[in-house]
């Protein structure tokens, strides 16, 4: 008895690919509905074992937070972590804040974004960012040179939008995305080539400027650091520990100077004036007021970054208490 030869799967005559800069069909209003108005931004996910990460995300979902954001430096890979987050709960959205464009080429980024979006439609937002010179040349192998960040981002988006994607869903419009943006030219690029912008380490005054630059039809998702404490020593200690690395990065320093701070404010871990402008502190009602200031200035979504005693600590008690007043 002979075993029948399997019939080979026919090769499609029309290859499903993403060709050309096809914009997402998701308007910014739809993105706001998926993200909700309030999300969480945290670096603590990288330091939770996967089993504990899943339990934590499930609780965020039950508490009612709309979205969970995280960054990408030398910890977990951003898109892989998105699958962990989205698989842990049925409702909460996930957003990379940001996926570092130096961490993978544009074809890989396009494939990863499409894969996660297809697996969890309507619950994933790709945030892309150009990162910082010291975090690229100093940390990533291969002799990368950090130069002309705006041109590099534009070229990266061009390459993503023209990348071959030979897989199911390849003929669909690209998934929605936002760009990390602080200065006017990157905000312009976010308006032109994305569904909006993700801003970080900013003030309500910057939020108003970003809204004006983006226009009314683009998503503006703003990160806001907070310390849930009324003790001044605790506030300053946690805030300065958080701000320490950012005050060494030229992109953030330039933006803070644009916002009226001075070089003197960067000394000794940050002046109290700088701390008070960048980190909202106090009880839960004070945190609510600080978040509302961004909404009044034009934000669609605010992702709250709760600062604990260390970057690796998961401030679960504060996340729970804030849910009662923010959601």
Image: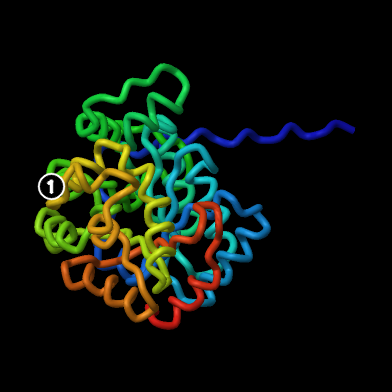
What coloring was used for the rendering? rainbow
Residue 141 placement (x, y as % from top left): 47, 22
Residue 131 placement (x, y as % from top left): 34, 37
- Quadrant in which the N terminus is drawn: top right
Residue at the disc numbered 1: 258
Q: What element carries label 1?
A: helix
Q: Residue at position x 13%, y 63% from top?
A: 216
Q: In which quarter of the image is residue 323?
A: bottom left
Query: Is residue 23 left or right of 87 when viewed as pictured?
Result: left
Residue 262 placement (x, y as % from top left): 16, 46
- Please tell me which residue lies in front, 265 or 307: 265
- Please tell me which residue lies in front, 242 or 70: 242
Q: In which quarter of the image is residue 122?
A: bottom left
- Please tell me which residue lies in front, 227 or 153: 227
| Residue at the top extreme of this rendering | 143
Q: Residue at position x 55%, y 49% from top?
A: 46
Query: Is residue 266 left or right of 209 when viewed as pictured?
Result: right
Residue 199: in sight, yes or no?
A: no
């Amino acid at each position: 008895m002979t075993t029948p030869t399997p019939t080979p799967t026919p090769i499609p005559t029309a290859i499903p690919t993403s060709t050309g800069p096809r914009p997402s069909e998701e308007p910014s209003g739809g993105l706001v509905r998926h993200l909700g108005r309030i999300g969480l931004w945290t670096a603590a996910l990288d330091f939770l074992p996967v089993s504990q990460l899943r339990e934590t995300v499930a609780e965020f979902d039950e508490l009612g937070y709309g979205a969970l954001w995280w960054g990408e430096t030398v910890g977990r890979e951003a898109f892989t972590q998105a699958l962990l987050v989205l698989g842990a709960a049925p409702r909460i959205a996930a957003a990379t804040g940001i996926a570092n464009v130096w961490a993978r080429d544009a074809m890989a980024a396009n494939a990863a974004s499409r894969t996660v979006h297809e697996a969890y439609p309507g619950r994933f937002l790709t945030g892309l960012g150009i990162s910082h010179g010291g975090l690229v040349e100093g940390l990533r192998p291969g002799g990368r040179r950090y130069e002309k960040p705006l041109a590099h981002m534009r070229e990266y988006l061009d390459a993503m939008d023209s990348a071959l994607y030979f897989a199911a869903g390849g003929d669909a419009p690209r998934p929605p995305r936002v760009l990390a943006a602080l200065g006017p030219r990157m905000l312009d690029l976010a308006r032109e080539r994305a569904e909006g912008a993700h801003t970080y380490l900013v003030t309500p005054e910057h939020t108003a400027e970003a809204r004006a630059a983006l226009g009314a039809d683009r998503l503006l998702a703003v990160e806001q650091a907070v310390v849930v404490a009324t003790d001044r020593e605790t506030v300053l200690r946690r805030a300065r520990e958080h701000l320490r690395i950012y005050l060494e990065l030229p992109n953030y320093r330039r933006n803070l100077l644009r916002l009226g701070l001075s070089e003197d404010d960067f000394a000794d871990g940050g002046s109290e004036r700088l701390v008070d402008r960048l980190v909202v502190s106090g009880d839960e009602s004070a945190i609510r007021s600080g978040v509302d200031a961004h909404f009044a200035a034009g934000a669609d979504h605010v992702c709250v970054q709760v600062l604990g005693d260390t970057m690796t600590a998961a401030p679960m008690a504060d996340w729970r208490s804030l849910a009662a007043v923010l959601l």
